[in-house]
Image (cartoon, grey):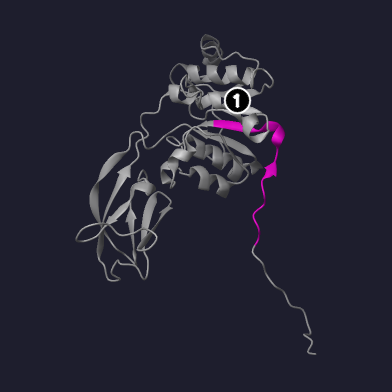
Amino acid sequence: MAYRHGVYIQETPTQLTPPVQVDSALPVAFGTAPIHRLEDPVAAVNVPMIFYGYQEAVMAIGYSDDWTRFTLAEMLYSQFMVHNISPLVCVNIWNPLENAEDAAAVELQVLKGAVEIDDAMAMISTVSVLKAGDGAYVRGTDYSLAYDGDKLVITVLGGGKIPADVAALTVTYKKAVIDGIEAADIIGGIDPGTKKRSGIELADEVFLRFQKSPGFLLAPGWSDEPGVAAALMSKAKSLNSGNFSCIALLDFPTGGQVSNYSAVPEWKNNNGYNSPYAFGDWPCVAIDG
C-alpha cells in the first residue's frame, strides 16, 4: 500500500452565509415586481409568497435594478443582500398581461451564436423567433431564452434547425407596460363575485397560508400616499378578524410641502398618519445611496 507523505490541501468554494431567520418581525411587502420575466407571470399576481433566500425570490418574482417601477425588487435587495434576514413575504399586484403591447418585429444580428433583445420590458413568455420562410423556430430545441440583467438573450442551440452560420434572426414579442399602476391597485379589496382578495387585503391570508403572523406591513414607494397608508394602518390594527396586530411602516413625502423636517408634524396630522400601530419615516432611510 502506498502512502502520501507531507501536507496536502483541498479547496472547496465558500458557501454563501444563509440568511438569519426572524419570524417575530416578519415583513409583508406590497408592490410591483418584474414578473414579465417569468414563464407564467399570472401565477405571481396577487398571491402572497414567502421567501427564505435571494435566489428563491428572484426565481419566483424576478429582479430589476429599476426600483422606481419595481418596488418589490428594492425590498428583495434590502432584506437579503443588505441585511441577510429571512423570511420575507411579498405580494405583487401587477399583471403584465393586461396592458401588454405588441412590439414590432425586429431583425437582430447574431454574435457568437446569440442575439440580444435590448428591452427590459420584453415578456419572455411571448418571444417568437421567425423562420426565413414561414412559421417559427421551436424554443428549447432550436434556441434558448434567458434574461441577463435588463437584456433578453436568445442563444442558438446546436443540433437545432437554426443554421450555424446564420447572420441575423427576426424576433417578435410583447412589451409589458407598467405605467398605469395606481394607489387603488396597491390598496386592493375583496371581489364581491369571486370573494378573492387583492392588494393589502391579502395581509389576512399570510397566517392562513404560512402559519406566521406579520410583524410589519410595507408598501415601498407607495406608503407616502395617504390612501395607501390608511389601508396599511387599518390592516395592521386588526389582522384576521382582530386575532393579530402588527406595525405599518410608512414613509412621509420628502418634497413639496414636506421638504423641511419642521413641516413633517403638520403634514402627518393633516393626512391622518397617527395610528399607534404605525411608524412614520422622514426622510426615507438609505444605505450606500
Name of the residue lying farthest toward the front: 193
Q: Position of residue 178 (x, y in %)?
A: 37, 34
Q: Is residue 66 visible?
A: no
* Residue 22 within the magenta-colored segment of the rendering: yes
Q: Is residue 251 above or below residue 64?
A: above
Q: Is residue 158 above or below residue 169?
A: below
Q: Position of residue 174 (x, y in %)?
A: 31, 44
Q: Is residue 273 above or below residue 119?
A: above
Q: Is residue 69 left or right of residue 75?
A: left
Q: Position of residue 140 (x, y in %)?
A: 40, 60
In the depicted view, which residue is nearer to us: 203 or 134?
134
Q: Secondary structure at mark 1?
A: helix
* Residue 245 within the magenta-colored segment of the rendering: no
Residue identifier under label 1: 204
Q: Callout 1: few (<14), some (14-19), or many (20+) C-alpha neighbours within 10 Å?
A: many
Splitting the image into 4 quarters, where does residue 111 fall?
Answer: bottom left
Q: Is residue 149 above or below residue 237?
A: below
Q: Name which residue lies at 39% across and 37% down.
A: 96
Which span is picked out in magenta? 14-29
Q: Count every numbered label the image shows and give the total.
A: 1
